[in-house]
Amino acid sequence: MATHEYNPEEVRKRRLRGRRKKNLREWLVFTGYLTPSLLGVLLFFFGPMLIVLVQSFQRSATNSEFVGVNNYVNVWKNQAFQSASKNTLIFAGLAVPLAVLLSLLLALLLSSKIPAKSAFRSIMLNPMMVPVASIVLIWQVMFSYNGALNTYLGWFGIDKIDWMKSNWSRIVILVLFLWKNLGYNMVLFISAISAVPNEQLESAKMDGANAVRRFFSIKLPYLWPTIFFVGIMSLINSFKIFREVYLLTGDYPVNELYMLQHFMNNMFSHLDNAKLTAAAIIMCIAMIIIVGGLFIAENRLGRDTEE
Amino acid sequence: MKRNEITPLQTIGSQVQNVNHENEHEHGSIRDIQEVEIVRLSAEELEALHAKGRADARRRMKVRTAAERFWIAVGLLLAVIVAAFALMPIVLTILDSFMSTDEIKTNYSAVYNSLSSASAETKTYLSSTPKLKMIPDMVSFSQYKTLLFLSPTYLLKFWNSVVLVVPIVLGQIMVGCLASYSFSRYRRKRREVLFFSYVILMLMPFQVTLVPNYLIANKLGIYNTWWAIILPGIFSTFSIFLLTKYMRQIPSSYIEAAKLDGANEWQIFTRISLPMCKSAVYAMAILLFIDYWNMVEQPLILLEDAGKQPLSVFLSQINASEVGIAFAASFIFMLPPLLIFLYGEQYLVEGISRSGIK
């Protein structure tokens, strides 16, 4: 009879054990799916990142004497690091807003009533698929000192400009960046625009709101999340601009184009472990601050538009 | 006057009513206006009414479209300009690849002599200007002939690129799908923190991630081998971020239903989650392919031997004497991604589009 006796304590325990068992089973199954990735990420990224962090406080790769923040101070004061960060930041500061703005305009254009929209979309998406290395030649033909662009400008009596070796080099790289990235951003914006509820646009049209007004008061609030997403993607891509610079100008570009990756490459080739690790940690922290700031800004703005 | 059934004139009902009233007048009968009546009209009257309606509509359209057409024309012009800008480098490269080596040299030697090392001196005395030629004088396959049959280096580098990229794409997709499934189904607090750290890792530029990659490659003894690039590539978290986003959009009712039918997790994964984000997986594969086909940073640092470098790095080191075949090499290099784009554009557009939706 004892088994039929109601014992709340016993039932509760059994239930708890049952739930724990189920939870454990679930955890095991899903951790199993995650395991390959987790092991790889730990082995190739997070683990070595910890070693990098430790080494950034040591004198060198062979001498593990603790030197405090010495390496950080050295990197921070390094002329090359300063100019590389400055150039990278200036480029990002120019490229990201321009990429967001221009691709938004293009998306609006391709969401309007013009014909052959999908053909235009394909064409504008095309540059994304083309490896930089294979259009570098044409770019050099256009922009080198004896290049085509200078020849054409010469017809209008404009003096030759040394595009790749002067202040103009930033603009050349910027054009190349936009050429490559606008298509991807534009597709993101097109889908966001098409997700704007049509009824609101129609009723605003009925009430006599013109296109500009309709954009700013109806479409834009819906587009903020996409604007942030595109902004972050463009920021990430703007750090990859080293590719273009390297392929166009090689290891030693003009000062304006000396990017952080050039600095890192130099440190790699000098095997300067102390500076290398400290610089990586500095950049890692800077990235976390920038991206975190963007996320927080997006959250705050998102809340504002919802209210 | 006969009352009758509804004529096809409902669309321009107001006019019908007018006609009605006129008819009423003629017959001198007073009717309640609220009682809407529809009258059978003779064939000619009907035709006249239709014509009037059409003319009205046409006039209205004309007023609206005059302004509209202007803006469409402006928009079209802008789109054409942007499209031309987007296509120009690609088209020029393709066209130039059909010039003979001599033709390239006569046209572009001014450019390439002023490049790289000799720039400082040549700048001053070079008087010849390059002609940017669109159409080759004579279509010649000499560049391709030299490239494909006479210079094995290019083919070797091309092969290097393939051997590096294909395992990365396949491996990352496999690892990524499994991990994304886990992240999309098991959402506890600690898992979310881990997912967020994956996102942060995805956002880290090469300047940061290459240092740990270099360190671990040295420790594992794979530095200066292809593994130093392939292994970190497989475990990169880029695909996991987007694929997880997709898998979380799958309605949970599908999964619950499968569970009730007694499906285990593997069956849910292979029969529901994977098929439902097929387009995302394709899009991801395309994005990964182009990203790694294009890589420059990793091979520069992780591969010392020039012989192991992929074509992307090698193409930039072409010097003046090889310019004659460089355009064909460039075209062959951009061919695989372009073909993939032609084949998978739909998936790519859909994949990118949905990745932006939160």
Image: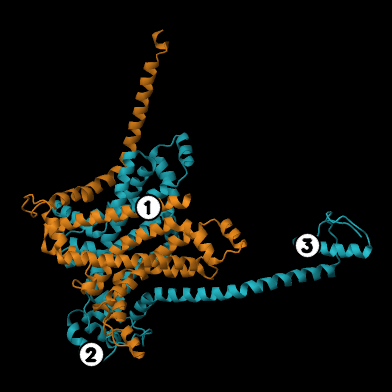
Chain colours: A orange, B cyan
| Side of B231 relative to B15 (left or right) | left
Residues at discs 1 and 2 in contact (Cβ within 8 Å): no
Q: Nearer the viewer, residue B323 or A8?
A: A8
Please tell me in which quadrant of the rendered image residue A229 appears: bottom left
Q: Nearer the viewer, mark 3 or mark 1?
A: 3
- Chain designation of label 2: B
Using the image, determine if residue B24 lies above or below residue A173: above
Circle 1: residue type: Leu
Is residue B170 visible from the viewing direction of this image? no
Judge the density around disc 3: few (<14), some (14-19), many (≥20) Cα neighbours within 10 Å: few
| Side of A116 relative to B37 (left or right) | left
The residue wearing badge 3 is B14
In the orientation shown, which residue stands out farthest toward the top? A1
Give me the disc on residue B126: 2
First along the sequence among labels 3 and 1: 3
Q: Position of residue B340 (x, y in %)?
A: 38, 64
Residue at (37, 16) in percent of width and height: A9
Q: Nearer the viewer, residue B54 or A162?
A: A162
- Chain designation of label 3: B
Q: Position of residue A198 (x, y in %)?
A: 56, 57
Using the image, determine if residue B172 lies above or below residue A266: above
The residue wearing badge 1 is B242
Q: Are marks 1 and 2 on the same chain?
A: yes
Which structural element holds mark 1?
Answer: helix
Q: Nearer the viewer, mark 2 or mark 3?
A: 3
Distance from the alpha carbon under mark 2 to that under mark 3 = 80 Å
Using the image, determine if residue B223 lies above or below residue A34: below
Q: Nearer the viewer, residue B329 or B189?
A: B189
